[in-house]
Image (cartoon, rainbow, N blue to C red):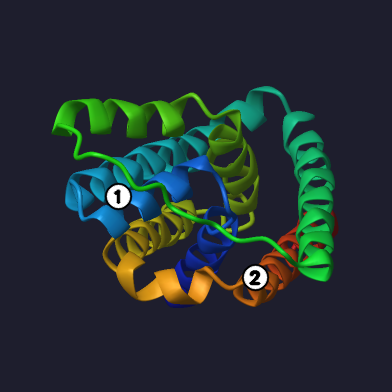
Amino acid sequence: MTFPIFFTGFGAGLGLIVAIGAQNAFVLRQGLLREHVFAVCLACAVSDAALITLGVSGFRLVSTVMPWLDPAMRIGGALFLLWYGARSFLSAWRGGAALLAEQGMTRPLWPTLITCLALTWLNPHVYLDTVMLLGPISTRYEGAEHVFGLGAASASFAFFFSLGYGARLLRPLFARPQAWRVLDAAIGVVMWTIAISLVAGR
């Protein structure tokens, strides 16, 4: 029973994290330039894991004190995911998107890490994804929330290290707008599927 829960957490975490954003663009840029790739990927993944742990471990405790919080978060999360999925579908339909990494001079490690952490911890969407969305979803698996959280955290490690070290291989592909259309459509499907599960309470 734990493996399905783990892979559900992995899929939910991966579906939320793969969306194009400033943090992912930064990791891609560092991977393309081969600058501090391991440190940047580790900083992003560990930050995500810490926030996921906070959401998974603390959400049930808080929801027992405020019983209205869980349904409110489910509805709010579902509405956000429906909007996010619709935006992804619209982007896939319009096409023309491409993510190009900047080329620049080599930067020292610490300024690079500070920039990476700022993009992570100062982004309000990361709290919504890890704490506000994954937290309520984990309550569906009473007694196994930690398994769901481990799956979601594993998705962060897998994604960031794959993106950072696979950037050179991905650059020709994601320079093409068609690749982003496929990715955006897949993100839309994942977002709407999670939204429906939140509303259904399954």
Return the residue nearer the eye: 197 or 17.
17
- x and y, in percent, of residue 59 in the image: 57, 35
Q: Residue at x 82, y 62 (%)?
A: 196
- x and y, in percent, of residue 144 in the image: 47, 58
Asked if one can make out residue 142 in the rendered structure from this viewpoint, the answer is yes
- x and y, in percent, of residue 167 in the image: 34, 65
On screen, residue 178 above or below 20? below
Kindly check if marks 1 and 2 are in contact, taking CB atoms under 8 A apart as contact.
Answer: no
- How many tags in the picture? 2
Q: Is residue 104 left or right of residue 178?
A: left
Q: Amino acid at mark 2?
A: Pro
Return the residue nearer the eye: 102 or 71.
102
Residue where numbered disc 2 is placed: 177
The C terminus sits in image quarter: bottom right
Q: Residue at x 29, y 57 (%)?
A: 31
Q: Amino acid at mark 1?
A: Gln
Q: Residue at x 51, y 38 (%)?
A: 55
On screen, residue 154 above or below 115? below
